[in-house]
Amino acid sequence: MARKNLIGVSAAESAAPDTATPMTATRPLAGFVAPAVRSTPIGGITKTLGSITQKFERAQDIEKQLAEGQTIVELDPAIVDGSFISDRLGIDAAELAELVEQIKSHGQQVPILVRPHPQDKGRYQVAYGHRRLAAVRQLGTKVRAVIRELSDDQLVVSQGQENNARTNLSYIERALFAVRLEERSFSRDTIMAALGVDKAALSKMISVVRQIPVELIEAIGAAPGVGRRRWMEFAELAPKSRLKDLLALLSADNCRAMSSDQRFQKAVEIVRRRPDKARAATAAKVWAPSDRSVSVTLKTTAKKATVTLEASNGPRFAEWIADNLGDLYEAFRKSAKETTGD
C-alpha cells in the first residue's frame, strides 16, 4: 500500500494562510513614526506619466499617418494652392453649382489630395480635387483633405490617374495636359502613367496639340463630346494663317453663348470653306424707279456679278440695256478716267 504524506506536512497546514502579525506593527522601532496615508499614491503619478506617454505616442502615430496620407484633416482653403500644372480648360459653371449644392446638403464625402507646398512653408498644393476645393471655397467652409508627401512625378501621376478614374476629362484636355507635362521635362513613361495610355496614343495626343494653336483650343473649350478622330481631322484642316479670323469669330457673343461642342463644330465649318466661299458675297443692291415699273437687283462676288431685272418693264429694260451696251460701256470708261485721273 502506497504511503502518503511522507514528509509529515498535512495538506491543511500547507494551505493555511500566513496570519502572523509583523513585528513592526506590535513593536515599532524607536523613533520611527509611520507616515500618514497618502491621498494620491505614487502609483497615480505613474499612471499620469503613462497617460502622457500614450498621448505622445498617439501624436507621433497621427503625424506618421499624416505623412503616409492615411488621415483626413480639415484645412482652410485659403492656404491651399492649385497644382503647378493645369489639366482643365476651366470649370463648368453649371457643374460647379451642382457640386456646391451636393456638398451643402451632404457634406464633402470625398477628400482632396494635397502635399505640403514645396516652396511655401505652411501652405499646401493640390494633386487632385480642384472642383471640390472650388465648391468648398464658395461655401466658406474648410476642405477635407489627405496630406501626403509627393514628388513632382508622384503628384502628376496621382492627378492624372484620379482624373481618368473620376472626372473624365475631354480628349483635348488630356492632350493639353500631356503637352504641358512634356514641356516641363517629365519623361514619356511618367506622362503615360499619368494618362493611362500607351506610347502610340500619347504621340497622337501630342501631335494634335502641336498642330492646333493653344489659343484656338482655349477659344473652343473642352468639347467633351468630341473625340480623338475629330480633333485629328481638325488639326489637319486648321491653317495657322487664319488664326486671327477664327479667334475673332469664336470670341463673338453669339459663339461664346454656344456650348464648347458647338464652338468646335463652328470652327470646323469655317476651316472647311473653300476660299471663294470664305469671302462672303457683298450685300445685294436693289434699284427701282418711283413708279416701280422695274426692279434691278445686283449681286457680286470677287469675280462675278449678277444683274436681275424684274417687274412689268423688267424684260423691256433688259433688252434696251443689251442694245446699248456699247454706249453704256464707253460711258463707264469715261467715268472711270474722270474718277482716277488717268
Image (cartoon, helix red, strand yellow):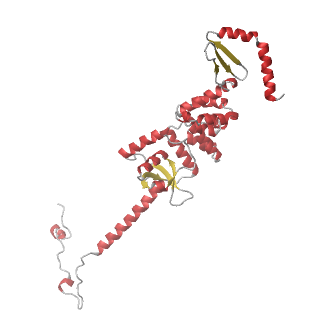
Q: Is residue 223 visible?
A: no
Which is more toward the observer, 165 or 251?
251
Q: Is residue 120 above or below residue 315?
A: below
Indicate the quadrant where residue 170 lies: top right
Q: Quadrant of the N terminus?
A: bottom left
**What's the residue at 49%, 46% (across, down)?**
130
Q: Position of residue 59 (x, y in %)?
A: 41, 62
Which is more toward the observer, 295 or 11?
295
Q: Is residue 164 above or below residue 121?
A: above
On the picture, is 157 further left or further right than 30?
right
Which is more toward the observer, 261 or 62?
261
Q: Is residue 144 visible?
A: yes
Q: Position of residue 103 (x, y in %)?
A: 39, 45
**What's the residue at 61%, 27% (across, down)?**
269
As drawn, the residue found furthest toward the right would be 342
On the picture, is 332 further left or further right than 71?
right
Q: Position of residue 246 (x, y in %)?
A: 63, 34
Q: Is residue 38 above or below residue 220?
A: below
Indicate the quadrant where residue 313 lies: top right
**What's the residue at 56%, 33% (across, down)?**
255
Q: Quadrant of the C terminus?
A: top right
On the picture, is 145 further left or further right than 245?
left
